[in-house]
């Protein structure tokens, strides 16, 4: 039964599709066009340069290549360091919260609460907590007997540890909630059957929980990698990209190149290279995780 | 599975609670300290000499750091943004969930594909677009472009797929047109989903950092996150003032969260599980 005319679906879609075309598809295509030009926002002419911006990124002698790959390396370090924690710890938290106990909803809400704060608040808050001389973290460590202060925002590898740690604090509840929903979708009969077969808690986790969570797991890994690659605010606010340039992420380099130095052609070329890298990573993790069925 | 939780279990749950709450409490406490006390070692747990100086500094200095102005800007932008998202996403989601048309699969596929494209790809061209539209440094830049995101459409579509078809069929037999069915039957039945999407869109917009940082310039037009960055630059070591700004930015969303946390958490859970 059709109670509507041929054009009706398109009319319902129209408001969204106008926005989608104008602010997503249009910019995606136009951005690629920009990346083929010497697109300096402040200059009148924007000469076509073909793939020069891309070539420059792969030419060690060009001025854009070094900072870009330095930023890419920082982003990669952050992603590799944070994703295992952001995938594993929330799973533990979800298993914990999946048990029935008084106040479960309350604790779930508390663990999720940091995520409703923005990166600006979280960044400033940790900037103070991590301060080398009067931060409360070093004060706590002094109390425990450590006599030299750690430069959480000014020395390596501590800056990475601090940035990963605060990101885990901030977002662990988000992934935990997604896992928890996945756990609650696993039929109780499967656990009961496993228990009848004599499976212990660990075996039930490996043979019932893990396979049941597989689709959720693939989603969480993919989304977490994408989110980590977007790392920006934590470095801007807490370490200011330092010490040196070591926590200056790819996104900081792209934003600086395009929006502070107005070399937008080069910046968009960087965006597309980073996006392609991410697409490859997502595809690889998708295939790897799916095939282990 | 029905064992009673052990003592160790409770120790773990309480310890985690402390870990998640302590930084927030520390931020709030610091906002009432003097600069000197905030730099004291070892730090005082409770302010020895509580002062509202930091609040006075950022809430009244008007032109310099108009924190209240930023809060109002953030609130207006996030509210309008959430309203726009809910409107366009529910309409599009309804068409994609319940109507048959030629390019349905292609359109849905294209929208979903962008869910996995990182936002920075659109940063530069969108900035130029704002410039050409004359939207730089205006409310428009904060409200409109973000509403083109794929999440809302996906979220509403999933919800509409689960509404029983009989509901609309009865109305259609009575001769109601698609718009009437949508506004009189579907939307009233979708209130939980609409509320959830409103809250999620509001929070995302309220917390957005990178976009407002670059498209806004005038101090009086900033949103809270961009303003906090400015505050940090202006009061590098005056932590009570910075923590006060952060507190002012977090208290409204934490209060909102306390009232609607069920919606927020379920919305997040739903968006992941059916992905």
Image (cartoon, grey):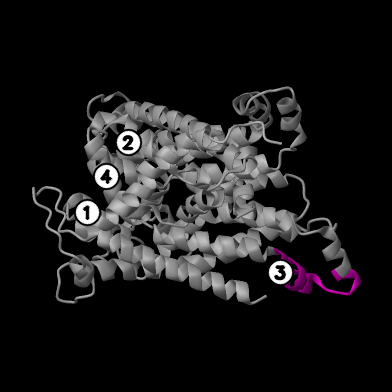
Q: Nearer the viewer, residue B160 or B51?
A: B160
Residue B54, percent from left and from top: 33, 32
Q: Which residue is mark 2?
A: B141
Whole-Å distance between the Cαs marked 4 and 1? Answer: 10 Å
Q: Nearer the viewer, residue B152 or A149?
A: B152
> For the view shown, which residue lies furthest in the right direction?
A196
Residue A195 on the magenta span? yes
For residue A98, above or below residue B192: below
> For the view shown, which residue lies furthest in the front direction?
A6
For residue B38, above or below residue A172: above
Q: Which residue is mark 4?
A: B127
- Label 3 lies in what chain? A
> Does residue A134 show up?
no
Q: Which residues are magenta?
A: A194-212
Whole-Å distance between the Cαs marked 2 and 1? Answer: 18 Å
Estimate how packed mark 1 is, as few (under 14), some (14 to 19) or many (20 or more) residues with alpha carbons within 10 Å: many
Secondary structure character of the magenta stretch overall:
helix
Residue A164 found in image quarter: bottom left
Evaluate if marks 4 and 1 touch, with contact meaning CB atoms under 8 Å apart: yes
Badge 3 element: helix
Residue A137 on the magenta span? no
Q: Which residue is mark 1?
A: A258
Q: Nearer the viewer, residue A118 or B193?
A: B193
Q: Which residue is mark 3?
A: A211
Badge 1 element: helix
Residue B11 found in image quarter: bottom right
Give a yes or no on whether discs 3 and 4 share a subunit.
Answer: no
């Amino acid at each position: 039964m059709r109670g509507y005319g041929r054009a009706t679906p398109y009319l319902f879609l129209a408001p969204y599709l106008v926005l989608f075309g104008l602010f997503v598809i249009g910019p995606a295509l136009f951005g690629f066009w920009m990346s083929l030009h010497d697109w300096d926002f402040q200059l009148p002419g924007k000469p076509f340069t073909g793939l020069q911006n891309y070539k420059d990124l792969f030419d060690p002698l060009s001025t854009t290549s070094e900072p870009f790959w330095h930023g890419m390396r920082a982003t990669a370090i952050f992603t590799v360091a944070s994703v295992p924690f952001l995938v594993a710890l929330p799973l533990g938290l979800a298993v914990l919260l999946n048990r029935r106990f008084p106040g479960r909803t309350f604790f779930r809400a508390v663990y999720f609460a940091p995520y409703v704060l923005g990166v600006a608040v979280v960044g400033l808050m940790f900037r103070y907590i991590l301060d080398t001389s009067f931060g409360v973290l070093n004060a706590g460590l002094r109390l425990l007997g450590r006599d030299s202060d750690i430069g959480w925002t000014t020395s390596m590898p501590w800056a990475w540890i601090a940035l990963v740690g605060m990101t885990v604090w901030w977002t662990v509840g988000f992934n935990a909630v997604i896992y928890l929903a996945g756990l609650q979708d696993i039929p109780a009969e499967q656990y009961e059957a496993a228990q009848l077969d004599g499976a212990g808690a660990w075996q039930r986790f490996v043979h019932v929980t893990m396979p049941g969570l597989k689709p959720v797991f693939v989603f969480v890994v993919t989304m977490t990698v994408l989110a980590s690659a977007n790392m920006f605010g934590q470095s801007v606010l807490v370490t200011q990209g330092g010490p040196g340039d070591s926590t200056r992420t790819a996104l900081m380099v792209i934003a600086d190149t395009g929006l502070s130095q107005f070399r937008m052609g080069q910046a968009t070329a960087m965006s597309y290279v980073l996006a392609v890298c991410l697409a490859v990573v997502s595809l690889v993790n998708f295939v790897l995780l799916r095939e282990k069925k | 599975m029905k064992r009673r939780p052990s003592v160790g279990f409770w120790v773990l749950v309480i310890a985690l609670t402390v870990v998640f709450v302590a930084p927030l409490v520390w931020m709030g406490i610091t906002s009432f300290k003097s600069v000197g006390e905030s730099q004291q070692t070892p730090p005082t747990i409770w302010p020895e000499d509580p002062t509202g100086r930091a609040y006075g500094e950022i809430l009244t200095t008007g032109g310099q750091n108009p924190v209240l102005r930023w809060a109002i800007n953030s609130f207006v932008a996030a509210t309008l943004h959430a309203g726009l998202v809910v409107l366009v996403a529910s309409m599009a989601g309804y068409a994609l969930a319940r109507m048959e048309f030629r390019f349905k699969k292609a359109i849905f596929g294209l929208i979903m594909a962008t869910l996995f494209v990182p936002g920075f790809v659109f940063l530069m061209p969108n900035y130029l677009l704002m410039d050409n539209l004359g939207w730089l440094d205006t409310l428009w830049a904060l409200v409109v472009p973000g509403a083109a995101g794929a999440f809302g459409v996906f979220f509403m579509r999933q919800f509409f797929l689960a509404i029983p078809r009989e509901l609309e069929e009865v109305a259609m037999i009575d001769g109601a047109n698609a718009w009437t069915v949508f506004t009189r039957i579907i939307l009233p039945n979708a209130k939980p989903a609409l509320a959830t999407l409103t809250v999620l869109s509001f929070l995302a917009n309220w917390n957005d950092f990178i976009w407002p940082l670059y498209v806004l310039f005038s101090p009086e037009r900033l949103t809270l996150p961009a303003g906090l960055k400015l505050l940090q630059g202006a009061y590098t070591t005056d932590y009570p003032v910075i923590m006060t700004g952060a507190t002012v930015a977090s208290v409204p969303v934490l209060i909102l969260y306390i009232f609607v946390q069920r919606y927020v958490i379920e919305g997040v859970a739903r968006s992941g599980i059916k992905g």
